[in-house]
Amino acid sequence: MSNASPKLRPGLLYRIPLVRRPFFQRDFVASQRDAAIAERDAAIAELDRLRSVIDVEKSRGSDRAAEIARIAEYISRDASVLQYRQAYFEAYGHTPPEPGVPAARPYPDPASSLSYKQKLTGLLPISNGRGAEIGPLDIPLLSKDEADILYVDHLDTEGLQKKYPTLTNIAPVDRPMVNNNLADTLRADSPLDYLVASQVMEHVPNPVRWLREAAETLHTGGLLALSLPDRRMTFDFLRHESRPSDVVSAYLNDAIVPDVRSVYDHHSQASLINMKWASELSVTPEEIVDGYGSVQPPLATDSHMEYVYGAKDGKYFDVHAWVFTPPSFLILMAQLTQEGFIPFRCRQFYPTDKHCSDRGNSSFTVILEKVSDDCSRRELRKSFLMCLGG
């Protein structure tokens, strides 16, 4: 008789009650059962773990969805967003595509790969016209060799050399300012075919008056080429965009120097942002955004209140009196033309392009065309609004 354990088909084995089986069979079945129970328990534990993960993810998803909803509600109630969406609808006859936040586009011609200088001067009649560059200092955009051009600045050449002793290549000034008035300064030379002002208008204490004076120096159809810094790329990053009401107030109050509001806003908010050339403490706009409030760059100016009180006494301080983004500038200009403050239409607009390798990565460009008195204000307004979107 063999001592080997009998081989039973599993189907038969499981039909025999456990208590009636031989001990070796009981042990075999018990081990199988224990293994199955252990496997079942492990599966249940894993299922519980997965359920808890799913619950956590659902909770997180719910929280994230609620957070996104709060952000969307805040954005949709922001005045600049509301004004942009209304202006967009006025221009195009339909609402802007999602997310409907302020944006601008090159219009009417695409920017393609134009340089900073090409954007500013490409439409000007340089070869057969006469113009003036305002505030060229040591880096004029147009040289005397390539254009029939006058250099205009707030001081004469000697005065600029004394004011900026570290600059060795200041362009000789042809027309120092007369009576702090651009039209008076260029009256003997008018009418001109074009004016160029790179990074100037944001410093002007009274933009409406300055634009009207510029128009006086141009013949109808003459061009004014402007480049302005984009708040989002400069030390103005933490400041609010300038409002039409502030610009109109400066005009109606006949401002001749930056007022207290301008000086305080500049010096209390201008910070070391995108200023690696000036300080190792400078940070980027992206670092501030990603920091979610934890990255707070130092102010660019210490003891700024002394400047504020000086402005109150009527002293002149060179500040960014006005702060823009491309959309905010377009909407402001549309309103100024609608109100009849300035006789210009938008001939060409180039928004800021952060991918540019020159100043175009922190500045936007607009070419304004002087119009006749009988030009429709509605048409002028729409010339700016058509540059919205992107």
Image (spheres, rainbow, N blue to C red):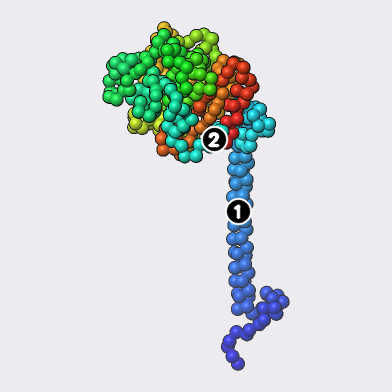
| Mark 2 residue crowding within 10 angstroms, few (<14) / some (14–19) / many (20+) | few
Q: State the residue in front, 381 or 165.
A: 381
Tag shown at residue 50: 1
Disc number at residue 109? 2
Amino acid type, callout 2: Asp
State the residue lying farthest toward the front. Answer: 128
Q: Name the quarter where the C terminus is drawn.
A: top right
Q: Give SS at disc 2.
A: loop
For the N terminus, which image quadrant?
bottom right
Give the amino acid type for the residue marked by disc 1 in the picture. Leu
In the displayed structure, 22 sits above or below 130; it is below
Is there any visible trace of residue 87 in the rendered image?
yes
- Counting from the top left corner in percent of width and height, residue 33 is at 63, 69
Q: Mark on residue 193?
A: none
Crowd rating for badge 1 (residues with CA inside 10 Å; few <14, some 14–19, many 20+): few
19 lies left or right of 125: right
Identify the residue shown where x is 59% and y is 33%.
Answer: 389
